Image: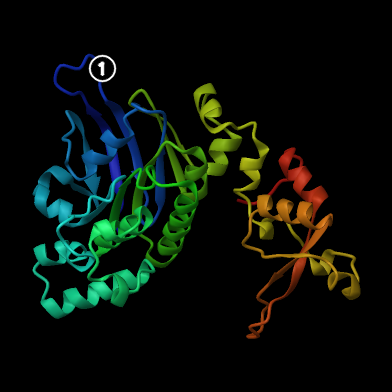
Amino acid sequence: MSWIRFEQVSLTFPGAALPAVSQCSCEIAAGKLVVILGPSGCGKTTLLKMVNRLYEPTAGTIYLDKQDIRQIPATTLRQQIGYVMQQSGLFPHMTVAQNVAVVPKLLGWKRPQIQARIDELLTLVELPPKEYRQRYPAQLSGGQQQRVGLARALAGNPQVMLMDEPFGAIDAITRSTLQDEILRLQSQLQKTILFVSHDVEEALRLADYLLIMQRGAIVQYDTPFNVLTRPANAFVADLLGVEDCMRLLSLLRVETVMTSLANASVQTETLSKLPTVQPQEDLRQALSGMLKTGSSQLVVMGKGSGNADRPVPLGLITLKQIQEVAKGQLSVPF
């Protein structure tokens, strides 16, 4: 597992009056998805591209697993880092299989290993190999192209992934689907990911940590919950819209707020008549369920302590509890 550390990193482009990136310091923990968020021109992509040496800093040092990246040949470094950009960047004259195979070929993998890896990754990103292997990028939708781009970035099994607004040019429905895909893959693969975005909702949905930039500098680096509840300054508060309590609700899982059945005074007969929610769903989804059903409480259904596959009641969540969270009157673990 790899981690990244920035130490007083700056970059001033030739002829520029001000630095594009200014004295940035932070540490990206191994296996975490960090979203770099900020307005256009704040230095997000510039900071990202310095990690794989597409740009070289004019001051400071970037470390990958305790090694100064300037001590690693650029080609070798880039082969160790997956890179996904806004436009998929697929080679139009190559098939899907050939695109995915680019890095493994550069790494000198044997043909059987490469072919197995292609099938493995296309299956992972839910593009059945038999159907998609021989297609060309022009024969794919935008969302499918991005899935292939993601598979190609994963092909060499890098521990670090750089993602530069990968879903910025895709329609909202496909974008949401691909965000789900990233969360699913990250839960399985646990890569160290730097993800550039200008979309606050996307950032809050994906990030383990938010790295917020303004005019080339890092102004806050913390969990989404901490940034929303304790913004570093007025700029961060305005950027995230911290007055929007619905955003806060989307960050908290039902299981963190629910009352266990042992502490809930409710009869079994009543439980069977109530709408249900899963413990991993967020409070925003729970509230939506209450509004749709007209019920002021939901039964939380999930896996019990036994081996049974059938979900069992775990607890209750009420409208009053959600209201208290939104008003800051209920303390919850996070």
Q: Residue drawn 19% across and 57% down?
A: 80
Outermost residue to the top: 17
Q: Nearer the viewer, residue 267 or 220?
A: 267
Q: Residue drawn 44% across and 60% down?
A: 181
> Residue 256 location, x and y as percent?
67, 56
Q: Element type at marker 1?
A: loop
> Residue 93 location, x and y as percent?
14, 58
* The N terminus lies in quadrant: bottom left
Q: Residue drawn 17% across and 42% down?
A: 53
72 w.r.t. 50: above or below? below
Circle 1 packing at 10 Å, graded few (<14), some (14-19), many (20+), is few
202 w.r.t. 261: above or below? above
Instruction: Give the quarter of the image for residue 70.
Output: top left
Q: Amino acid at mark 1?
A: Leu
Residue 223 shows in the view: no
State left or right for residue 74 relative to residue 219: left
Q: Residue drawn 45% across and 45% down?
A: 209
State left or right for residue 36 relative to residue 235: left
> Residue 200 location, x and y as percent?
50, 38
Instruction: Give the quarter of the image for residue 127.
Output: bottom left
Which residue is under mark 1? 18
252 w.r.t. 302: above or below? above
What kind of colouring is applied to the model shown? rainbow
> Residue 82 location, x and y as percent?
25, 55
Instruction: Give the quarter of the image for residue 323.
Output: top right
Residue 44 shows in the view: yes
